């Protein structure tokens, strides 16, 4: 999977790390991602409202771009 784009606080952002694919079976059409420490991602998005990409480093979400 390419880098996922998700909506956080009403804005699309790109996740560079800190996620994994959510597929139960290969033939299943529903795809998504599981985000590590989602509450920390929302807090990081609130701290840096202009950021468009985030990475999960050492247990914290960091604005990357």
Image: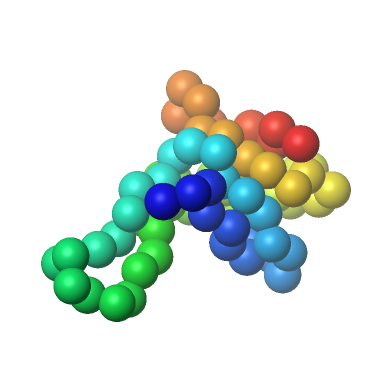
> What count of labels does the image hold?
0
Judge from the rendering whether residue 28 lies leftward or rightward of residue 8; answer left or right.
Answer: left
Residue with the most extreme top position: 58
Judge from the rendering whether residue 22 lies leftward or rightward of residue 54; answer left or right.
Answer: left
Quadrant holding the C terminus: top right
Q: Residue at x 48, y 37 (%)?
A: 17
Q: Residue at x 41, y 51 (%)?
A: 1
Residue with the most extreme left position: 25
| Image location (x, y in percent) of residue 39 | 51, 52
Residue with the most extreme front position: 27
The answer to whether residue 62 of the structure is visible from this angle is: yes
| Image location (x, y in percent) of residue 43 | 64, 48
Judge from the rendering whether residue 18 lies leftward or rightward of residue 23; answer left or right.
Answer: right
Q: Is residue 18 above or below residue 43?
A: above
The answer to whether residue 44 of the structure is visible from this angle is: no
Residue with the most extreme right position: 50
| Image location (x, y in percent) of residue 59 | 45, 29
What colour-coding does the image apply? Answer: rainbow
Q: Is residue 31 above or below residue 21?
A: below
| Image location (x, y in percent) of residue 2 | 49, 49
Judge from the rendering whether residue 8 lies leftward or rightward of residue 58; answer left or right.
Answer: right
Q: Residue at x 51, y 26 (%)?
A: 57
């Amino acid at each position: 999977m390419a880098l996922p784009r998700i909506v956080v606080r009403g804005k699309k952002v790109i996740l560079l790390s800190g996620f994994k694919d959510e597929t139960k079976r290969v033939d299943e059409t529903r795809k998504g991602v599981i985000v590590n420490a989602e509450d920390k991602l929302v807090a990081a998005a609130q701290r840096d409202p202009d950021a468009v990409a985030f990475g999960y480093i050492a247990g914290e979400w960091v604005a990357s771009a």
